[in-house]
Amino acid sequence: MRRLVPPLAVALALAGLLVPAPAAAADPGAKPAAYRLECDGGQRPGSTCTVVSTGKPRPHHVEEFTTTVRSGDQVWARETVYSRDGQARSRPFTLPEQEVTVDVSVTSLPEKRVGTPLRLMAWNLFVGGTINRQEPTGENLQQMIEYLNEVDPDILFVVEGYGSGTKILDGLNAGRPADKRFSGVQLTKPEDYSVNGDNLWLYTKLEIEKVYPRYADADISSFNIGGARLGLPNGKHVHAFSLWTWHDGYAFGDTHDAAVQNTHGLPRTKTTEQILEGDHLRRVGMGKAILEKALPSFIGDDDAPVLMGGDLNAQSHLDWSEQFANAPGHGGVVLPWPYTKMYTDAGFLDTFRYANPDAGAYPGRTWSPLSGFGAVPARIDYVFARGKDVRILGSRADVSRLPRHRNSWLDQPWPFYSDHGAVITDVVIRGKGTGPDQPIVSEEPGKARDIWPAPPAGNRIPPAELSATASTFKPGAGDPARAVDGNLTTDYHSYYPEVVPQPHFITVDMGRVRELSAVRFQPKLRVNMNATIVKGVVQVSDDGTTFRDVKRVEWPRMTAPNDVDMKGVSTRYVRLRVDYGMGGASALAEIIPYEISR
C-alpha cells in the first residue's frame, strides 16, 4: 500500500515508476504487486488515471490482480483482473480532490483452478415485455428476447414475467446447441399471483439441482422471493434468487424533489427523516423477512455463494452517502437508506456499486428509461452476491435498445424494452475452472452528463423583457407566459395531444433584435416527466412570421437544462418546434435567451 502525496505522486506519475505495495490483501494467498499510476496531464484532481500492475508470471498459472483506490474509507476505484502475462491495467478512474491510497495485490492460481465465470442479469420486464400491455403486437417482446440473447447471461433474474415466461424461454433457446440451452423456473406460485399473474422467474444455463419451496409469511410470499440451487460445472453449487419488494414510499420521487429543491434554493417539502421513512412503510419489513427468515429456510448453514437479483424499488445507501453529496444530480442530499443497508449488513455485495464505486462518475441509473430519468440518479434494480469465493469483475446498467433496434417504430415512444434498466454483472466463482472466457462487461463513465451545467456564456435577458406565445397550451395551468416568467416551478404545457397533435410551437419575443450567444431550454422539474421535449428544431425570425432553422435538437429524457449555441445569431424571435415530446405533449419550465456580452 502506498499513499500518494504530492509532489511525490506527480513524480511517480510522470516518471512511470513502479511502486511496491508493502501491505498484503485480505486473501491469504495474495501478495503485494508492483504498479505504476498513469494520469493524463499529471496527478491533479479531475485527472483520468489508470493503475498498471506487474506480477511474476509462471507457466500454467493465471494471476489475479486486485486493485483498490481509496481515500480513507472512501473507495473511488476497484477492479479484479485475470492475466496470463503478468500485466494488468485497471479501467480509467477520475482522481478525487482527496489524497489517495492505491492498494494492489496479486494471487497466482493454477490455470485450471481459477474458477467458473458467470454472467448475472437482473431485469424487471414491465408486464412481460408488453410495456404494461400498451404494445400488443409482440414486436417489443421479440426485440427484448433478441437483446437477452445478445447479453447471454448464465443466470437471469426476472421480475414481472406476467405471462411471457414460456415465450421468453422458447426465444432464448431457439437455435441454441444443447449444451448452451436455458432452463426456466416460474418462481411465483399461483396462490401468490397479482392481477397480472405470475411475477418472478429464474432462467439459467446451469443445472437446476433443486427449486426451493414457496415461502410465505405476513410480509412476503413467492411474489417477492424464490430461487433454486444451481450446479456448477466443477461439481460445486450456488444459490440463486429473484427478488421484488414494494414500491410504496416512492424513493425516487422524494429524492428527486429534495435534490431539485436544494439545488435551486427552494423550500424542502420533506425532511431527510421523512424521506427515509418511505423504506419503513413495507420494504424494511420485507427485507427482514427475506434475509432473516426466507433465505435461512432455503439454504440453512450452507456457505456456498448466494446470488440474488431483482427490483427492490429502493435507492442505495452507497449512492447517497456523504462521499457523493455533491455528485451530479445529488444537490447536497445525503440519505442513509436503511433498506439496502440491510443487504450490506447481511454480507451481500451490491455488485454494480462494488465494480463501479464512484457513484458520481457511474450513477448506474435504472429508473426510468421510459418515463424519464428526472433530475437525480435512480438506481433501484440490483444484483447481489455473497460468498468468500465470489470475485466481481465488472457490472453495467443498460437503458437503451440495441443499435439495430433503434430504427424501429418502438424506439421513440419506448427507447428501452422496459421501464426498468437491466443490470448485468460478470463474476468468477473461485475453484476448478479456467476463469473468464469472454470480454468483461463494464459501465461507461459519465454516461449521464452533469445534471446542472453552468449557465451559458453571455448576459441573460431578463424575464420582464420577454413574452411568449404557443400554438397550443392548457389555459391557465399551461400558459406559454409561464415559460418566460423566471420561475422554475411553473410550466408551459401543451393541450391534450389527442386534440392537438405534434408538432407544437412555442415562440419567445425578445422585444427587439438581439445578438444571441445561446438559449437555455429548461425542462419541467417534476417527477412526472410526461411532455418533456425530446426532439425538435430551434428556429429564429426577425418579424415573427418567417422563420429559419438554426439547429435540430435531440435531448435526453432528463430534467437537465438543454443549452443551444446560437453562434451570434441576430434575431428578435426564437421559436422551438417540438417534433416529439414524451406522451405526445410538450412542456417547458423556462426558455432563457442569452445575448452576447459587449
Image: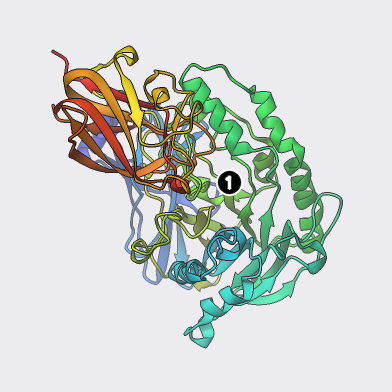
Q: Quadrant of residue 255?
A: top right
Residue sitting nearer the eye, 198 or 552: 552
Rendered residue at 47%/85% (across/down) = 175
Frontmost residue, 295 versus 187? 187
Q: Could you say where residue 39 lies in the image, as x and y percent from the top left?
A: 26, 38
The structure's colour scheme is: rainbow
Residue marked by disc 1:
380
**At which x and y percent is residue 218?**
86, 50
Quick check: 200 above or below 377? below
Q: Nearer the viewer, residue 518 or 454?
A: 518
Q: Amino acid at mark 1?
A: Ile
Task: Locate residue 83, reporting x and y percent.
Answer: 37, 61
Q: Is residue 25 left or right of residue 11?
A: right
The quadrant holding residue 447 is top left
Q: Quadrant of the C terminus?
A: top left
Q: Left or right: 362 with respect to 546?
A: right
| Quarter of the rendering occupied by the N terminus | top left
Image-based side of 150 in relation to 344, left or right: left
Given the current orientation, which residue lies at the most extreme right position? 218
Element marked by disc 1: loop
Q: As drawn, is 278 to the left or to the right of 349? A: right
Q: Is residue 562 above or below residue 408?
A: above
- The residue at 53%/46% (across/down) is 367
Q: Is residue 124 visible?
A: no
The crowd level at tag 1 (other Cα within 10 Å; few <14, some 14-19, many 20+) is many
Residue drawn at point x = 75 percent, y = 36 percent: 280
Can you give x and y, in whole percent of width and height, for residue 67 in the image? 43, 47
